[in-house]
Image (spheres, rainbow, N blue to C red):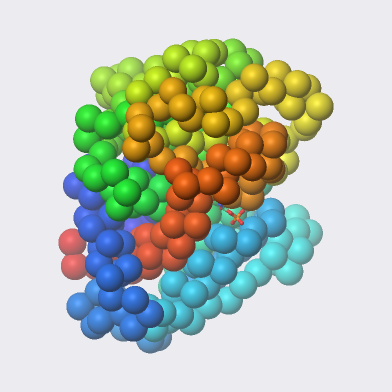
Amino acid sequence: MAPRHFLDLHLLDAATLRGILDTAHAMKKAGKRVPAKLRPKGIEDKVLVLIFEKPSTRTRVSFDVAMRQLGGQTIMLNNTDLQLGRGESIADTARVLSRYIDIIMIRANTHQTLQELAAHATVPIVNGLTDWSHPCQVMADLMTFEEHIGPLAGKTVAWVGDGNNVAVSWMHAAVRFGFELRIACPSELEPEKGVVDWVRREKGNVSITDDPAKAVKGAHCVVTDTWVSMGQTGADHRKKILKPYTVDAALMAKAAKSAIFMHCLPAYRDHEVSAEVLDGPQSVILDEAENRLHVQKAILAWCLSTDG
Ligand code: CP
Ligand code: NVA
């Protein structure tokens, strides 16, 4: 049987993603001691390898704790710990690790690395962020939205800032969960055409503008992220063209009265978001961070389950 990879939201159907989110809510309710019915069979004999080619606080700790709370084991590896860092091929790494362990999570510099790993591994691969997408983060954000606002279908989310990896996963999510996504970003930082075309083919409700006020008007949720993602160059230019996209109290005031503010963190106060908004009453950043744990337990359980 082909392994169940969790690579990107557009590669999974809406029912599967809904099922994972439902499990995530149940995991949160259950707390640290995951009941047997939510644990994959034989989890106590399973090992998750976590590979990090880039730094991480949340992904690193929440995946490690998630696997332990499910009853499994973990091994944490940085890029330089592996022969991968000395030029061993991704394919060989995938084949060899598949002989030892049961599931791999990778935070990769390039999306191609993730895809190659998945193509050659015989165990599930989970995307813990690449330069192209960050699906685990957006699953946690969707869960957070449901907790604070309610069902996603028909709601409006405004993404303000760089059209980056997190924005791409939000675009996938908008299509799969049936909500409107309005992206406000400078034209040169728009998400790549391939994703925009995919949304169009899927008849998704995603619009792109360079006007933050237009995107935010009446939105149920306003989201932003760092202006300079890991591995990106041209920091000074980015900061200059993104300056009008700071999410501050004046911009938040244009959203719905009950709107929430999201940021995947790490955040840079008074750059992409004012300290007032980030630390203010509409901000749900710590719930997003916490929900990484619950949603990733659900993702690991889904990847490791073979019962359909
Ligand atoms: N949001 C997120 O993925 O954080 P880390 O980079 O700390 O893992
Ligand atoms: N867009 C950011 C997200 C960090 C979690 C980055 O890739 O650095």
Report the front residue among 265 and 35: 265
Above or below, 175 relative to 287:
above
Q: Is residue 285 left or right of residue 84?
A: left
In this picture, is 272 found above or below 122? above
Q: Position of residue 280 (x, y in %)?
A: 53, 46
Question: Which quadrant of the figure has residue 240?
Answer: top right
Residue 47, how many percent across, how many down?
47, 78
Residue drawn 30% across the image and 22% down it: 205
Residue 138, located in which quarter of the rendered image? top left
Residue 115, visible in the rendered structure: no
Q: Which corner quadrant holds the N terminus?
A: bottom left
Residue under the image location 44 percent in, 57 percent down: 287
User: Which residue appears farthest toward the bottom when viewing the image?
Assistant: 44
Q: Residue at x 52, y 19 (%)?
A: 212
Can residue 230 be seen in the rendering of this structure?
A: yes
Left or right, 4 with respect to 267, comes to left
